[in-house]
Structure formats: C-alpha cells, structure tokens
Image (cartoon, helix red, strand yellow):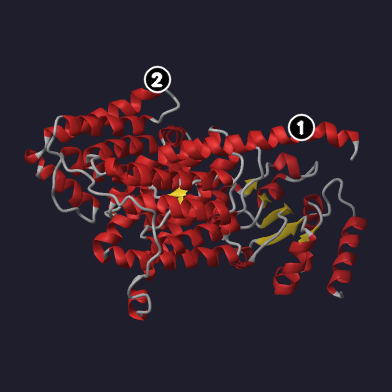
Amino acid sequence: MAISDILQKPQRLGSLFSGLRGDLTGGLTAAVVALPLALAFAVASGVEPKAGLYTAIVAGIVAAIFGGSSVQITGPTGSMAVILVAIVGKYGIEKVWIAGVMAGIIQIALGVAKLGQLVKFIPYPVTAGFTNGTAVIIFCGQLNNFFGLQVPRSEHFLPGVWQSVSHIEALNWAAVGLAMVVIVTTVLWPRINTIIPGSLMGLVLATAIAAYFHLAVPTIGSIPQSLPMPHGIPHWNNFRLIRELINPALALAALGSIESLLSAVVGDGMTVSEKHNSDRELIGQGLANIIVPFFGGIPATGAIARTVINVRSGAKTRLSGVIHGVALAIFILTLAPLAAQIPLAALAGILMVVSVRMIEWKAIGLLIHATYSDFAVMILTWLVTILFDLVLAVEVGLIAAGALFIKQMSDLSLVKIPETEVFPPGTPLELGREIAVYRVDGPVFFGAAERFVTFVRHQPEVKYLILRLRFVPNMDTTGLVALEDIYHDLERHNCRLILTGLQPEVKQLLKRSGLLKIIGLSNCFETTTDAICSISPQIEGCSQPIAAELKTKELMELNE
C-alpha cells in the first residue's frame, strides 16, 4: 500500500462518516416534518390518516432506492391531495388503489421512453399558476375542520366553500381555538427553536390542550400500531373498471411526474452532488405508486418542502430517504395511540399554514412587473386549477403559453433593416422605396406569413422583399409552408421574394422540398448587396462582372 493511500485513508473515513451523519440527520429531520404532514394530507385526500403514514413509509423507501434523485423525499403532498379528494369521493378508496397502480405503470412507461426531460418545457407562469391554485384549494378545503363542522365533503371547490360558509352558525369554537394555536405555534416557533419543526410542536400542543380540557372536537381516530402489510387489490382484473379509471390514472401520473421532477430540480439547486436522472426518477416514482396501493397507501410524489429540509439538514445520498421511511415506521410503532387523539382542527391549522407558504408570492410580483401576457397565463392557470382540476389547468396553461410564444417569436424573429445599412452608396431614392429588407433571427414561424401579406397591402410601392436568412440555422415543415405562403402572396401582389445568406442545411431542405425551384435560384444570393446589385446593376459599386458571376453560379447550381 502506498504511503499516500495510508495518509488519505483517515480523510476518506472521515468523509464517509460525515456523509452518513448528514444522511441520518436529514432523514430523521424529514421524518419529523413528514409525520404531521402525512396525517394532514391523508385527511385532505378524503382517506384515513393511516393511509398517509403508510404512503410516506413505503413510497419514501421505494422511491429513494429506485429513483433518480439522491436527496428526494417522496410521500403524500398537497397537490396530489387536491386530485385524490375528488377521485375518492367519486370512486372510493379501492378504486383509487387501482388508479394508483395504473398511474405508476404510466410513469414507468414515460421513464422508459426517456420523456423525463419534457418537464423543462413547462413555462414558469404555468407552474406558478397551478401551485397557487393548489394552495387556494387546500386552504379552503380545510374550512370544515377549522370551524369544527361535521358536514359531508364536497368534491368541487365552489360548492365546498359555500357548504362551509352556509353552516358557519354551527361552528365549534374549541376547534377554532385549537387551529389558531397550531397556526400561531407553527409560525412563531422557529424563532425559539429551529431543530423541532413548528408544525410538530403545534400539533403536540393542540393535542395536549384538547386531552387535558376534554374538549369536544373531532379527532383523526385510531391508527393501527403496526407496520403496513401487503394485501390484495379487489377488482383488479375487471377490464371495464380499468377503462373507467384511465382518466383519473392519467391525471395522477401527469401530476405525480411533474411535481416529482420539479422537486428533484429544486433539490439539485441546493446540493453539489450528482444531478438527478429524470427518466430514472419517473421509473422510481412509478414503482412506488405501483407498490403503495398493496400496502393501503395512496399515490405519492416527490415533496418539495421535505426534500429541501432533507438537503438543508445535511443529506447527501439516497440513504436519507430510506432513513426517513424507517423513522416513520418507528413512529407508528411507538406513537400510534397518542396520534389517535390528534384533533382534525390541528391538522387544518397545519395545512392552512402550508397552503399560504405554497403561494408563489415572489412569482406573482415578478410576473406583474414582467409581461402582461405571462401574468395572464398564470392567472388563467390559477383559475382553471380552482374551478376545474390541475391537469386541465396545466393543459390550458401550456396551450395559452404556446400561443403567446408563437406570437412573440413571429414578432421578434423579423427585424426591419434600415435603408442606410443595406443599400450601396448612390442607390436611387425611387429604388430604395421599392426594396424592403428584413432579417430573420432563429426559426421561421408561420405567423410571419400573415405579417408580410399585411405589410405588402399597406405598402404597395414595395416591389422587392429581401429576407436575410443567415441567422436561420434550420427550418421545419411549418417554416417551409410559411415561406411558400409568403412567396405566393407576394407574387399575387407583384412583389418579388429574394433570399440571401441561406445556410447549407436550410438550402438542402428547400431543394428536397422543391420550394427552391419554385422560388428560383435567380432569387437566392449570398449577400444582400449582391441581391440589390442584381436588381439594379447600375448602382455605384455594382459591376457587370459581379452580375455575370452570380448568373454563372446560378446555372451551375441548377445543373447539380
């Protein structure tokens, strides 16, 4: 053994110990934070509290082992609860298990197809919109528990809010008081102690007050003091039922994939360790959602807040996620009888604080001061999330953002070049009025066609339109169709289309499609000056040899 290896061995052991200590601290801290949240999100999903704990344990361990992020913490989340409460109310928990398995299969298929990178194409206003919408739904969904009302849960947002408001005369002041205790403790406790989460401290304090004074408030009920055990799923072989649940499964898979990958990106930004593998993360989340229903859990996703806490507490590897799940299992075995006494109002207080903190206040300010179009996309996504559902909100937001993007690119990709920059000295004024030169930056979009038609209609004196394409690296079918439409529309207005600076790839594409033959090689030049000289060789600086050279080049290319 080399002397350098002997000297470095203590350093390596120290680094390994430090990493293990960080994973242990991160996993335990994440488990402490996850305990009240798992109970709260289960209640918000319309299922028994134990389902939230089982989900955090099983999904947390499976996703940590097989997922693509080293620091991701997986479990029940607020966004998933918003979808689950509607599915549970319509289908029941057994069908939710089937939908969860189907969602997991879809996520694995997305990962195998290497579609994990697609989350990067979701615009920021869309993610901000559905995050803010989710926060509003979670907050208003806890009004019944906050007021201590024992009324049936509504599947939809507006009827649910009206239901809570219309029964306000039956509110339980003890429940309101306990919820306020939790809210105040959760917000103020970090000023006293940053090790124990404020939500956990508030939960313990509210439960102790309710038990000591024997307050008549609804509680979460008994939680089995045992680990989750595997069981079968009924009706799994019913094809008609599977077909019925395909839409809920797609919704769960879409939201689970988006939120998990966004959470993994947040984790990447806080650590210097290896970045996450999006495709493997989808596979890991899919496996977790396939396995969890067999243990009585609900569909899970990567949890942003718990992942952040895990990293900040020193986590470096996926061992932290496993420790998080094991720690929750120990909590169940030791604290289940006490957890049964937790008031629902206390969980409502926790969720209300979580929902307020979920709102992207910074994003709202940024988008207000940025562009009205992006702000409009966020508001639209926000409203659709509240009034309909999250998946539809993402779809509508993407469509709106895509339409605005195309509109903006159609405007930005076309730049009018001033006459003083392109016309050779001595160009006659009359000729300058007849020639318009535009520079195209980036891909050619179909929105450009209509713009040029309108331009020619309003300026009938223009007889030559020169497009400088030197900065167009490629062109797709949409660009080809747009360019052909421009050519034919200009031809009908007796305006000649001239192209300059064609890149080799674009030129080959025009040749293969036959569009170059339609436009004509005589209308394609290397530079704008060459194009103007071909229009009027008598301009100072233009010579007959140049014109002849261009003509010879055209004939040679035509014969290729």
Measuring 48% from the left and 53% from the top, which residue is drawn there?
258
- Picture coordinates of residue 533 (x, y %)? 81, 53
Query: CA separation, marks 2 and 1?
Result: 39 Å
SS at circle 1: helix
Query: Closer to the N terminus: mark 2 or mark 1?
Result: 1
Label disc, if present, on residue 10 of the rendered structure: 1
Q: Position of residue 49 (x, y in %)?
A: 30, 50
Using the image as rendered, state which of residue 230 and residue 359 is in the foreground: 230
Please tell me which residue is depicted at 53% across the width and 33% down the height of the picture. 313
Displayed quadrant of residue 372: top left
Residue that numbered label 2 is attached to: 191
Amino acid type at circle 2 is: Arg
From the viewer's perspective, is residue 425 above or below residue 479?
Answer: above
x 67%, y 56%: residue: 465
Please indicate whether residue 290 sits to the left or right of residue 172 in the image. Answer: right
Mark 1 surroundings within 10 Å by alpha-carbon count, few (fewer than 14), some (14 through 19), many (20 or more):
few
Residue placed most toward the observer, 295 or 279: 295
Task: Name the one closer to the observer, 220 or 310.
Answer: 220
